[in-house]
Image (cartoon, rainbow, N blue to C red):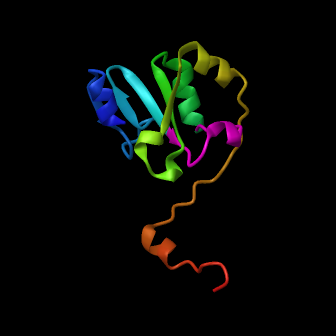
Amino acid sequence: MIQQERNFGREARDTRHRGAAADVVSGGRTIEVKAFGGWLRAQGALLLEARQVREAARNADFYVYVVENVAQGDPEKFELRVIGGPQLRALLARGKEHRYFEIPLRAAAYAKLPHLGE
């Protein structure tokens, strides 16, 4: 995603794991990237964190980049959709807040979890 933004002539940088509301800052844009193994339309909902919704409401340059079809593995077959501006605000107006807990799970702990049937 960073390289694609740079290809458009925007200076992009990764903001993940730095307390930012989104994954990338690029040429004034704040971009949250959502990847789906299949198609978002099959899921029927786009999940955003409460802080991302707040940021999108106050920042006209907040975008959600939806990357679909990633499970098949060939980047040439990925599909990218861009949601921003009035489209994003209209979608946010229809959103419903749900609460969830983020449970940290380290790779080493995950590797020790049993497989089904063990």
Q: Is residue 97 above or below residue 84?
A: below
| Quadrant of the image containing the C terminus | bottom right
Nearest to the observer: residue 70 or residue 87: 70
In the image, residue 27 lies at what x, y percent? Answer: 31, 21
Residue 101 relative to residue 75: left or right = right
Quadrant assignment, res 28: top left
Residue shown at the point (59%, 80%) measured from the top left: 114
Q: Report the residue that reaches farthest toward the bottom.
A: 118
Majority secondary structure in the magenta region: loop
- Judging depth in this view, the residue of 58 and 60 nearest the camera is 60
Q: Where does the image place residue 5, in percent across and percent down from the top left?
A: 33, 28
- Rendering quarter of residue 42: top right
| Total marks in image | 0
Position of the N terminus by quadrant: top left
Q: Residue at x 60, y 46 (%)?
A: 38
Magenta stretch contains residue 35: yes
Query: Residue drawn 59% across and 13% down?
Result: 86
Q: In the figure, residue 48 lies in which quadrant?
A: top right
Residue 23 magenta-drawn? no
Span highlighted in magenta in the image: 34-48
The answer to whether 1 appears left or right of 58 in the picture is: left
Q: Looking at the picture, how far across and down is residue 57, in whole percent?
A: 57, 21
Q: Where residue 80 appears, x then y in whole percent?
A: 49, 32
Looking at the image, the residue that sits furthest to the top is 86
Decide: is 1 above or below 117: above
**Residue in view at x 50 percent, y 47 percent:** 70
